[in-house]
Amino acid sequence: MTPELISLILSIVATFAVIVYVRGVIRTAGSDRVVDPLAVEDLMSSIDWSHADRVLDRKKS
């Protein structure tokens, strides 16, 4: 294989990858996040709240 052919193949693969990526971004652009109430409840029940006061009482610098 010549360097020109390798370069051409890599360019085609890179172009295809960018097209797939941009297509995915366009599909998800503007859509709302999926909110799972059960996952939120599970997260809130499993959080270690013992250090929350240190985080919430920090003064802004």
Image (cartoon, rainbow, N blue to C red):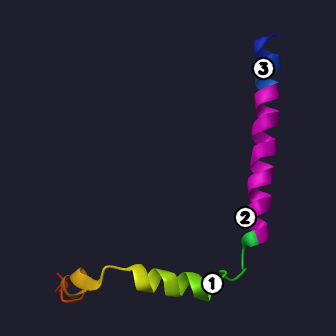
The boundaries of the magenta stretch are 9-27
Badge nearest the viewer, 1 or 2? 1
- Mark 1 belongs to which amino acid? Asp
Residue at left offset 81%, top offset 43%: 16
As measured in the structure, the alpha-carbon distance from the residue carrying label 3 to the one carrying label 2 is 29 Å
Left or right placement of residue 12 versus residue 48 in this view: right
Image x and y of residue 17, in percent: 76, 45
Image x and y of residue 9, in percent: 82, 27
Instruction: Give the mark nearer the N terminus: 3 vs 1.
Output: 3
Tag 3 and tag 1, C-beta contact below 8 Å: no
- Mark 2 belongs to which amino acid? Val
Q: Secondary structure at mark 1?
A: loop
* Residue pointed to by mark 3: 6
Residue at left offset 18%, top offset 83%: 54
Q: Main secondary structure of the magenta part?
A: helix
Badge nearest the viewer, 3 or 2? 2
Left or right placement of residue 13 versus residue 48 in this view: right
As measured in the structure, the alpha-carbon distance from the residue carrying label 3 to the one carrying label 1 is 47 Å
Comparing 58 with 47, the one in front is 47
21 within the magenta span: yes
* Residue pointed to by mark 1: 36
* Residue pointed to by mark 2: 25
Q: Secondary structure at mark 3?
A: helix
37 within the magenta span: no
- Mark 3 belongs to which amino acid? Ile
Looking at the image, the residue that sits furthest to the top is 1
Image x and y of residue 1, in percent: 82, 10
Instruction: Give the mark nearer the N terminus: 3 vs 2.
Output: 3
If the image is split into quadrants, where does the C terminus sit? bottom left
Quadrant of res 57? bottom left
